[in-house]
Amino acid sequence: MPDSLPRPTTELFPEALNLSPKQREVLTAVQRHPEGAKAGTVAEELGMHVNTARGHIDELVNAGAVNVVSAPSKGRGRPSLIFQARVPDNKAVAEEYITLVEVLTTMLADKEELDDAASTKALEIGRRWARAAGADASDGALDTLFATLRDMGFDPATKPDSTDIELHACPFVSSGLKPSPFLCAVHAGFLQETSDDATSITLVPRQPHNVCRLKIKPA
């Protein structure tokens, strides 16, 4: 019997479920109740008929976004149904990933200044990360770099008179904390792997105005 595999959490994100605007509205209402909510409660909060709310909830159940359980019985009659959101809290997931990254980088190199061995290790991790993510150098890779950085959460921006890219956010740090030099070197390795032979990408971390800068020049 083959080993069973856990379902990737990303499949539970609303973006992956292709929900309609109304389904998202109903899902948000269910999410406001950590212990679950009855269809009548959702209907009342959203100002819609209970049958309409129940119809949308059933669609969410079929989509795998909501779980349904029976409430504890309080006498005779059919037990009430309680609907619980299955989708994760994206912010909570991101914060846990950040914590894990911080712990791992601390164990790999708990230093403010990297020595040659740690720097080499970090760059190689970044290159392997890029290859595993399918972001290694290819024709047109530089053209998609901006979109890749945006989708990863770096909030990139450019200026009309420069080829440089400014990164206004970092997906690997908690608010008020700076990333470790090891982590910055990992990101530098990632970027190096995405550039082709004709282009040089240099990451300059922690510049004025709380940005990191990518200097992009012909190789």
Image: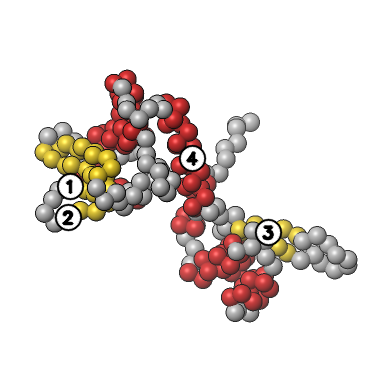
Q: What residue type is labelled 4?
A: Thr
Chain-order first, disc 4 or disc 3:
3
Dot 4 corresponds to which residue? Answer: 99
Spatial CA span between label 2 and label 1: 8 Å
Q: What element carries label 2?
A: loop
Q: What residue type is labelled 1?
A: Asp
Q: Can residue 128 be seen in this view?
A: no
Whether pointer 2 and pointer 1 mark residues with C-beta atoms closer than 8 Å, the reply is yes
What residue is shown at x 26% (from left), y 51% (from top)?
Answer: 209
Q: Where is residue 197 in the image (x, y as percent from the top left)?
A: 16, 33
Spatial CA span between label 2 and label 4: 33 Å
Dot 1 corresponds to which residue? Answer: 164
Asked if residue 126 is positioned above or below residue 69 in the image, the reply reads above
**Quarter of the image where one finds residue 1:** top right
Whether pointer 2 and pointer 4 mark residues with C-beta atoms closer than 8 Å, the reply is no
Q: What residue type is labelled 2?
A: Lys
Q: Position of residue 213 (x, y in %)?
A: 23, 44
Dot 2 corresponds to which residue? Answer: 159
Q: Is residue 215 visible?
A: yes
